[in-house]
Amino acid sequence: MLGTIRKAVLAGIGAGVLAKEKVEELIKKGEAAGRPELVKDLLAKAEEERKRLEEKADEAIRKAMEKLQVPTKADLEALSGKLDRLAERLDRLEKAK
C-alpha cells in the first residue's frame, strides 16, 4: 500500500517538474517572449497541481497509517506521559517503604 502511495507521489512530482521544464523550454526558445502572463499562468498552474498532489499524497498516507493502526506522534507523547507518571508513582512508593 505504501509503495503505491510512493509511486503516486513520485508521479506527481515528476509531472510538476515536467511542467516547469516545459515553461523554461518555452522561455529559452523565445516562444514566451512578450507573453509574461502566459509564463506566469503556466507556472501558477504547475504550482497548484504540485500542491494538489501533495495534499492527496498526505491524505493517502494518513489513511494508510490509520488503517495499519500506526500510532501518531500525539499517541506516543501521551503514552510517554503516562509512563513518566507511573515511574514517578513507583519512585514514591519505593521511597515510602
Image (cartoon, helix red, strand yellow):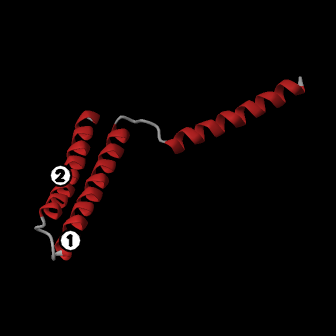
For disc 1, the neighbor class at 10 Å (few under 14, some 14 to 19, many from 20) is few
User: Are the two marked residues, 1 and 2, in contact with CB atoms closer than 8 angstroms?
Assistant: no
Name the quadrant containing residue 50: bottom left
| Residue beneath disc 1 | 41
Quadrant including the N terminus: top left
Residue drawn where x is 82% and y is 28% of the image: 93
Please tell me whether residue 62 is drawn above or below residue 83 in the rendered image. below
Label for residue 70?
A: none
Seen from the viewer's position, the closer of residues 53 and 33 is: 33
Question: Picture coordinates of residue 89 (x, y %)?
Answer: 77, 33
Q: Position of residue 88 (x, y in %)?
A: 77, 33
Q: Disc 1 residue type?
A: Asp
Neighbour tally class for label 2: few under 14, some 14-19, many 20 plus, Cα within 10 Å = few
**71, above or below 48, in the image:** above
Helix, strand or loop for disc 1:
helix
Q: Residue 60 location in percent, x, y?
A: 29, 46
Residue plotted at (88% across, 26% down): 95
Determine whether the residue tagged by mark 2 lies in a helix, strand or loop: helix
Q: Amino acid at mark 2?
A: Leu
User: Mark 1 vs mark 2: which is more N-terminal?
Assistant: 2
User: Which residue carries the number 2 mark?
Assistant: 18
In-front residue for pair 41/6: 41
In the figure, is residue 84 to the left or right of 8? Answer: right
Instruction: Residue at 19%, 69% (x, y): give it.
Output: 39
